[in-house]
C-alpha cells in the first residue's frame, strides 16, 4: 500500500496523512447519510426499526451498524499500523467520526448514557432539531426526512 513517507519528506507526509484523516471524517457524514437513507430505511429496516421505537434493555438491533463500522475501522487501523499508510489514517478518520456520532447521537440525543447535556450553540440546536424531525417523520411506512448525523441543513435553525 502507498506509504507517503517513502516518497515525501516526513513533515509533508504527516500533513497529508492528517488531511486524509480529516477528509475521511467529513466523507463519513456522506457515507452515513447514504447508508441511513438507503440501507437502514431500506432493506436494513429490520435492524434499524427498534431505533425508532422505545425498546427495553441496553442494546438495540440497530447497534449492529455501529459494530460493522467499528470492525471496519479496527481492521483498517490494525492491518496498516506497521506502515502507517493511507488506509491506517482512513481507519483513524472512520473511528473519530464514530466517536463523534456516538457522543452526539447515542449519549446526548438519545441519552443512552445518562447526562444533563442541553444544546446551547446554534449548531447543536440545529442537529438536535433535525434528528428529532427525523424520528417524527420516519416509520415503517416511509423513510422520513433528515438522514444526517453530524450535519443538518440550515432550514433546521432555531429562531
Image (cartoon, grey):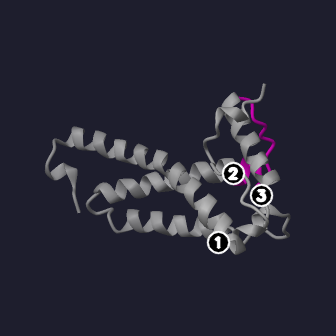
- Nearer to us in this view, 83 or 151: 151
Q: Main secondary structure of the magenta part?
A: loop
Q: Where does the image place residue 40, in percent across and percent down from the top left?
A: 65, 65
- Residue farthest left in this picture: 7
- The image's mark for residue 90 is none
* Secondary element at image label 1: loop
Q: Which residue is drawn at 39% across and 47% down?
A: 21
Q: Mark 2 points at which residue?
A: 105
- The image's mark for residue 138 is 3
Is any part of residue 87 visible from this angle?
yes
- The earlier-in-sequence mark between 2 and 1 is 1
Direction from residue 113 to residue 23 in the image, left or right: left
- The stretch in magenta equals 105-121
- The image's mark for residue 44 is 1
Q: Where does the image place residue 15, in percent across and percent down from the top left?
A: 30, 39
Q: Nearer the viewer, mark 2 or mark 3?
A: 3
Q: How crowded is mark 2: few (under 14 residues within 10 Å), some or many (20 or more)?
A: some
- The earlier-in-sequence mark between 2 and 3 is 2
Q: Residue at x 47, y 67 (%)?
A: 72
- Nearer to us in this view, 86 or 132: 132
Is 112 colored magenta in this rendering? Answer: yes
- Residue 139 location, quadrant: bottom right
Q: How crowded is mark 3: few (under 14 residues within 10 Å), some or many (20 or more)?
A: some
Is any part of residue 59 visible from this angle?
no
Is 104 colored magenta in this rendering? Answer: no
Q: Where does the image place residue 140, in percent across and percent down from the top left?
A: 78, 67
Amino acid at each position: 500500500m502507498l506509504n507517503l513517507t517513502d516518497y515525501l519528506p516526513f513533515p509533508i507526509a504527516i500533513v497529508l496523512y492528517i488531511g486524509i484523516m480529516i477528509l475521511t471524517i467529513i466523507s463519513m457524514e456522506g457515507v452515513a447519510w447514504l447508508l441511513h437513507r438507503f440501507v437502514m430505511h431500506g432493506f436494513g429496516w429490520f435492524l434499524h426499526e427498534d431505533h425508532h421505537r422505545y425498546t427495553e434493555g441496553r442494546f438495540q438491533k440497530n447497534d449492529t451498524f455501529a459494530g460493522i463500522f467499528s470492525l471496519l475501522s479496527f481492521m483498517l487501523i490494525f492491518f496498516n499500523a506497521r506502515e502507517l499508510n493511507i488506509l491506517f489514517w482512513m481507519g483513524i478518520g472512520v473511528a473519530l467520526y464514530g466517536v463523534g456520532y456516538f457522543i452526539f447521537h447515542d449519549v446526548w440525543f438519545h441519552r443512552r448514557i445518562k447526562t444533563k447535556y442541553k444544546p446551547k450553540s446554534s449548531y447543536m440546536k440545529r442537529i438536535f432539531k433535525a434528528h428529532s424531525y427525523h424520528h417524527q417523520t420516519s416509520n415503517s411506512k416511509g423513510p422520513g426526512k433528515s438522514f444526517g448525523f453530524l450535519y443538518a441543513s440550515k432550514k433546521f435553525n432555531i429562531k
